[in-house]
Image (tube, rainbow, N blue to C red):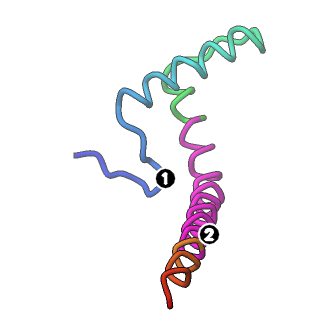
Amino acid sequence: MKTLKKWDTLSKEERNKINGEVIKFFQDERKEQIWFIQADEYIDFFLQHLFDSIYNKWIDDAQKILWERFQDFNVDLDLLKN
């Protein structure tokens, strides 16, 4: 069984798709040939280094949205008072 790292949240299908996109990027944009394992290492590197920042941003955004909705709900409840 493969041990997952905390940033390794991609399914096998998603990882394979992104892997193909990374290989295509290197071919098209940099005129370099890289292989599947190299592309996989790039994916791991970027996920590892970006995961915490992106995850924390998602949590902050969700918290903001929930707070705004709670405030709207609170106002709606106040309107029900006699």
Percent of width and height locating residue 12? 35, 31
The residue tagged 2 is 68
Percent of width and height locating residue 49? 64, 52
* First to last magenta residue range: 43-71
Above/below status of 31 relative to 68? above
Q: Which quadrant of the structure image shows residue 53?
A: bottom right
Q: Residue lying furthest bottom in this view? A: 82
Secondary-structure class at tag 2: helix
Identify the residue at horizontal 57%, vertical 46% (top origin): 47
Secondary-structure class at tag 1: loop
Q: Is residue 70 magenta?
A: yes
Q: Mostly what secondary structure, the magenta segment?
A: helix
Task: Inspect the image, locate mark 2, and give the three-letter code of the amino acid beneath it.
Answer: Glu
Identify the residue at horizontal 54%, vertical 42% (top origin): 44
Q: CA distance from mark 1 to mark 2?
A: 29 Å
48 vs 2, left or right, is: right
Task: Inspect the image, locate mark 1, and give the three-letter code of the amino acid beneath it.
Answer: Trp
Q: Is residue 1 magenta?
A: no
The residue tagged 1 is 7
Which label belongs to residue 51? none
Q: Which quadrant of the structure image shows residue 21?
A: top right
Q: Which quadrant of the structure image shows residue 16?
A: top left
Q: Residue lying furthest left in this view? A: 1
Identify the residue at horizontal 56%, vertical 62% (top origin): 62
